[in-house]
Image: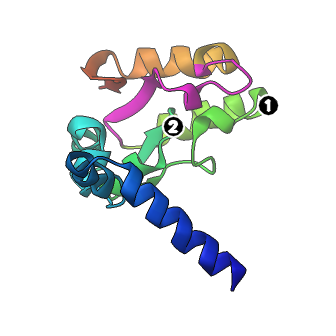
């Protein structure tokens, strides 16, 4: 009961301390934005569109929403290849070499692509070189670099 009273008083103080013209701004903060506005100006949708149509997707940037939006599954046992270890590198190269995919999201400037402050290129250099050779076409979509055959 005390908690409910506190919340009521807190809301009343907050309501009366916000100038009337600012209340609409406060209300906007309490509503969820539409999905399109969450997806960084459509960048993730554009990336997903490039990956769509393949049996699976390779995602080196730790962004699960790309796989969801592209309506694909992960191509390897690692949902995000940034989590693969050096010991898995040869196995990954062999597996990826057999896949029939045309694109891979290989880089992003997001903090989540660096595990222990190491990017994928320094973590798995042989895999990175293999992918760069296998997928020579480079396409940039805002914050994302996509390699294509």
Q: Is residue 38 left or right of residue 60?
A: left
Q: Is residue 13 magenta?
A: no
**Which numbered disc flags the more N-terminal residue, 2 or 1?**
1
| Residue farthest toward the right in the current orientation of the protein | 87
| Quarter that holds the N terminus | bottom right
Q: Is residue 116 magenta?
A: yes
Q: Which residues are magenta?
A: 101-120
Q: Position of residue 34 (x, y in %)?
A: 24, 57
Hey, which quadrant is residue 51 in on the image?
Answer: top left
Q: Residue at x 29, y 37 (%)?
A: 40
Q: Residue at x 23, y 51 (%)?
A: 20
Q: Is residue 1 above or below residue 120?
A: below
Label 2: which residue?
96
Observer-nearest of 51 and 101:
51
Q: Residue at x 48, y 59 (%)?
A: 13
Q: Tag count in the figure?
A: 2
Q: Is residue 134 above or below residue 11?
A: above
Q: Secondary structure at mark 1?
A: helix
Q: Secondary structure at mark 2?
A: helix
Q: Is residue 120 left or right of residue 20?
A: right
How busy is the neighbourhood of tag 2: few (under 14 within 10 Å), some, or many (20 plus)? some
Q: What mark, if any, has residue 128 been given in the picture?
A: none
**Residue 128 visible in rendering:** yes
Label 1: which residue?
87
């Amino acid at each position: 009961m005390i908690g409910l009273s506190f919340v009521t008083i807190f809301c009343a103080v907050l309501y009366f301390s916000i100038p009337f013209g600012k209340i609409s701004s406060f209300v906007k903060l309490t509503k969820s934005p539409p999905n399109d506005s969450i997806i960084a100006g459509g960048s993730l949708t554009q990336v997903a569109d490039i990956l769509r149509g393949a049996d699976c997707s390779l995602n080196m940037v730790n962004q699960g929403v790309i796989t969801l939006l592209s309506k694909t599954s992960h191509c390897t046992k690692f949902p995000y290849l940034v989590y693969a270890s050096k010991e898995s590198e040869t196995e990954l190269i062999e597996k990826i070499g057999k896949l029939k995919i045309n694109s891979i999201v290989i880089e992003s400037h997001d903090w989540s692509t660096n595990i222990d402050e190491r990017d994928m290129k320094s973590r798995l250099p042989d895999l990175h070189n293999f992918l760069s050779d296998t997928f020579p076409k480079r396409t940039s979509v805002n914050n994302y670099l996509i390699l294509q055959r």
